[in-house]
Amino acid sequence: MTKIKSTIFIFLGFSFLFGVIPNKKTHLEDDLGNTSNQFTNSRVVTSHSYFNGNEWYARVVNDGQWATDEPPLGVPGGLWPRGSNNSVLYDAGIWIGFKDDQNVTQFSGVQWQSDFMPGPYGVTDSDNENYRVYKVNRWDDATVSDWSDWPVDMGAPWQDNNSDGTYDPAVDQPYLPLDQTLYSVYNDSTDHPVFGTSINGIEVHQTIFGGVSAAHNDLSRTFFIKYEIINKGSLNWHNARFGPWSDVDLGDPTNDAIGVDVDSNMVYCYSAEAGAETDVFGISPAVGFRYISSVNSLDDTLSSGGCIGNDCSDGVGAIYSSPGNQDQAYNRMLGLDNDGNNIYDPNGQELRFTHTGDPVTGTGWLDGSTSDKSMFFSVAPGQLIEPGDTVGFVMAVIIAQGTDNLNSITELRDASYEAKTLWDSNFNGVSLVDRPLLESDEDYGLFTDFTTPSVGPGHTVQLERTYHNGGNEILNMSLSSDADGYSMDPASAAIPPGENASLTFSYTADNYATTVHQVPSEISTIQSAVDAAMQTNFNAVIELIDNDNYNTQSYVADYSYTGDTILVASGTYTENIYIDNKSINLIATDGDPTSTIIDGNNGGLVLIVDSGIGLFTLKGFTIQNG
């Protein structure tokens, strides 16, 4: 889903004043309120959590959405590398479709919202915290609430260390094949806002897990999802299909292309334009969904898969656009277009997939229209799914980065085969790594940048951030910047496992000099005075140096000065003014706004203010004829 950062255009038809010059020392509290430089171990249980067991960050909600956007701003929910806030996946979740005994299409799924509700099928208290997303790490124990409360009674997988058949958190443990596991259960016994069908009796047990290995580098860029799907209703599921859907936003989503590697059982997204993601990733990565294994008699190969979006058909209609109802979505999972017609490649070969060519060699059917798109795959069972039956599958979500955008696809294929091999061997040979795990205690575990408000000469502005060590080794932190004036208090921190530390970040401005410009006595027009005003907006690269080797904490932080003042004598000024990325104080010297007029001469917007992070003050004018 594309998010556009817009310039704000201001047409002012009256007199007003806005903008504040900071005090000598300004302290900005974040949402956590006042904290001190002390270690604490408080954590909050909510209906959502996030996977961060390796280089990935993926927000997980208890209604079946994962790598899902963060409200209210719609920040993508699948980010890589962890800590960078680089978009990879905007939203994702499962699709389930079938025909009932009357040959009516039934469908439940996720597509920017969910047809599911938290908890096992039939519950009426879906907001009960027992139906939250449970998250545990390999180094946790019974003192951690999600470990001690691990919902074995609802179907959560676990390891019975003493073989007594009863979960004892002091002896037994949740299912932890790697470093981190998240579990949730949800069902479709609610309204279906996505696809509009009736209740289908679906209960889904979702287990997300991953970690890092000293012997397998690609594992740090992979996480696994195991779906167990139970028919808890009264319907027979004929010709059923199961699989993931995702709105992929790989950096800049407007240059995304989708491909299917049928031999690898993988659908993937890559950047079709070499160097297009330099400002985001350096080298464009590729991200893929690999079908790893079936659970209870699903086929070993994909049934269908490929591209969803208005531009997936290379300009030939909207036959692959986002499904608007259950029939269109089910058709895609059957390997048809939205209207139920067969899919043909450019050579006329009938397929159940889109874009099965090889972008690395430039052969076959390639996605030729880059834009914001979604991708999916489906798998089929070998028989009718009757009430009480359980089916499922395991998939891997993998990102890989090569020497360029196409070599990243090659690296992705290699990583997908390693993921398959590791799963098939029950992760034999994986050498797990004890380590610190840097986490944010802000909303959704995201890391905010270090952008500060405008600061006067010699003034200081401060930001407080609280960090958590979710690992099992001491987390060491310090600050580095390519600009003078930034500091961290304390200058370094060593955060013990499981504890928090509140750190204060400060920026102190130079003793810069501002100028007062007189219009028209010194400069003839207001626009000329704006152009002559000092540059006030800058940016710096801020890095948190830490020993969590599977995250990146590098930000481009914006900072600004308070700027010059433009004093305008009474009179009429016929001009259209554009203030671009500067702090400006624009003030009329006459106290009567009717005596100082900016007239746009009916030439469009009279005053455009695009001051970025800077200040803008306007006082004592009449603005007319825009």
Image (cartoon, rainbow, N blue to C red):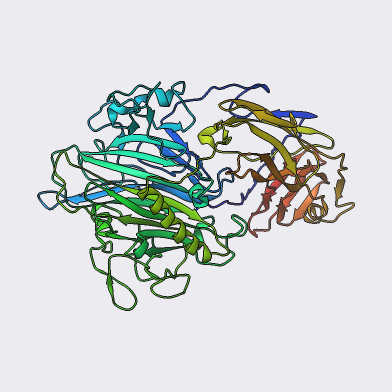
In the rendered structure, the answer to whether residue 347 lies left or right of residue 536 reads left
Instruction: Depth check: give the residue in front, 381 or 131.
Output: 381
Corner quadrant of residue 30: top right
Corner quadrant of residue 306: bottom left
Q: Could one spot residue 1 in this view of the protein?
A: no
In the rendered structure, the answer to whether residue 188 lies left or right of residue 272 reads left
Q: Could one spot residue 499 in this view of the protein?
A: yes
Q: Position of residue 54 (x, y in %)?
A: 51, 43
Instruction: Depth check: give the residue in front, 446 or 154.
Output: 154
In the rendered structure, the answer to whether residue 92 lies left or right of residue 117 reads right
In the rendered structure, the answer to whether residue 329 lies left or right of residue 53 reads left
Instruction: Depth check: give the residue in front, 43 or 307.
Output: 43
Quadrant position of the C terminus in the picture: bottom right
The residue positioned 61% from the left and 24% from the top of the image is: 33
The residue positioned 72% from the left and 52% from the top of the image is: 579
- The residue most toward the left is 102
Q: Position of residue 507 (x, y in %)?
A: 76, 36
Q: Position of residue 522 (x, y in %)?
A: 89, 52
- The residue most toward the bottom is 347
Up-down relation of residue 622 to residue 131 (above or below): below
Instruction: Depth check: give the residue in front, 278 or 530.
Output: 278
Q: Position of residue 403 (x, y in %)?
A: 58, 63
Label tally? 0
Up-down relation of residue 146 to residue 104 (above or below): above
